[in-house]
Amino acid sequence: MKIRVRFAPSPTGPLHIGGLRTALYNYLYAKKHGGDFILRIEDTDQKRLVKGSEDYIVEALTWAGIEPDEGGRKEGPFGPYNQSGRKDLYQKHVEQLVGEGKAYYAFDSDEDLQKLREEGTSKGGAFLYSAQNRLRLKNSLTMTSQEVDKALGEKPFVIRLLVQPNHEVVVSDNVRGTIRVNSNTIDDKILMKKDGFPTYHFANVIDDHLMEISTVIRGEEWLPSLPFHDLLYTAFGWKSPTFIHLPLILKPSGKGKLSKRDGDKLGIPVFPISWNKENIGFRELGFLPEAMTNYLAFLGWNNTSGQEIYKMNQLIEEFHIEGIQKGSARFDYTKAKWINQQHLSSYTPEDLLNQFASYFRPLKSFSRENKIKIVSLIASRIDLLSDIRAQIEVFIKNPSIDEKIARKILKKNPIAILEKSKVLLEQKPFANLKGELFDWAKSENVAIGSVMQTLRLSLVGSLSGPDLFSIMEILGKDVTLDRLVSATSFFVNLNLDS
């Protein structure tokens, strides 16, 4: 049997990274086994649809390198791939169940059901629309055929599955093992809503069967639905697919599930690409798509090799279901950035310049040779592509000297160091500058550390950064001299104020 998997998001807002991980695991499993990855849009809940969500989902998957074999922007033999376009199929199948006595019409009002729920709560229990009370409610099981026909023409109704009481429902999950549930704990869930659209559960099972889905890989939050889904497969006489439920992704603290709202609360991204100005995505923050999928792959899956850095083709080769863990995975933004840095470090300076040219646009006045030198200098200091701007600023903008830091090195005679540096810079080639300056410092009993701190603060505005003499060479003699002159004036004025 050919492996066919699906990712079935609802277009009710931006895709959370938990959803992207689900898509990734489905994709890896399909490609590992030469199967098909299907994108199915579950848009039956018309009240919750958010404009632009479907396009966002497709764009996010495309950015991550997770391209569907069917669905999204790609047609296939099992379409349509939006559930809103499959209503006739759901109607046909629900009528089959009603005709076979496995489902029934229910005419209870929302107000009546709410009252029953409140009564159940007041008695310390929960109201279930099931065998224990359905014969006391307003449904086709308690009405004559004439009454049913009349009600169908006059009243809103839903269609519910008839769950048989007093038997054990046994289901299996490849990660969780065997799960046993008494059918008395399962209510007669709604299959078709009053608006004529199917519920998630019903459409899900129908589509998985008709699209020949072999393996359902989805989030742990759907595990409680598994027994009910099994009842639907049984009602139709269909073989159910293999089920794999993925562990939750927790907040960085490890306390509670990472939600869409946690991005704002915790100051971390939770969306693969930006949804709006307030909800910034990993892409816009400067993550590489291969780093994103690399990190997400390990949020709930363990490999056997101990290797941490993977390209997509390597993940496909090594991915195995046995490595999916039961326990929840804690989101670690610092680790995500480290993985991104590891991927960035695999690029040559030329590749970085070519593939991410927009980030280096401020260097347009520099020669190609100097651009490559700059990238070589800053590459190890970049965790995210968005870090590039701050790292190259030293080459395009005169630094602001921090007065607080400057006062700390004032006693190290920075003015003398700067004056000597200017003289040597005017007289000596760059190749000899470092040696000449260090020889002078030794002869004058000036600490090398004082020399470097003074020059670095004067030329780049901080006490850390890439190799200073390489920066000076790229800046050129004129720009370097200008910065040394400005710094000298700064320290002279600071000295006068002290």
Image (cartoon, rainbow, N blue to C red):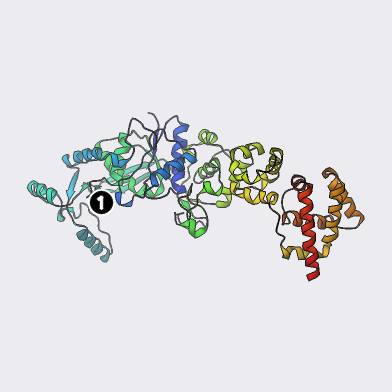
Q: Which residue is mark 1?
A: 187
Q: Is residue 437 left or right of residue 272?
A: right
Q: Residue at x 64, y 52 (%)?
A: 390
Residue 36 occupies quadrant: top left
Residue 88 position (above or below residue 181)? above
Q: Quadrant of the N terminus?
A: top left
Residue 336 percent coordinates (x, y): 56, 48
Q: Is residue 144 left or right of residue 421?
A: left
Residue 179 percent coordinates (x, y): 36, 45
Residue 303 percent coordinates (x, y): 54, 40
Q: Residue at x 76, y 54 (%)?
A: 483
Q: Is residue 341 left or right of residue 245?
A: right
Q: Quadrant of the C terminus?
A: bottom right
The answer, for residue 498, to whether it is visible in the render is no
Crowding at mark 1 (Cα within 10 Å: few <14, some 14-19, many 20+): many
* 97 and 53: which is toward the camera: 53
Q: Residue at x 35, y 35 (%)?
A: 213
The three-letter code of the residue at mark 1 reads Asp
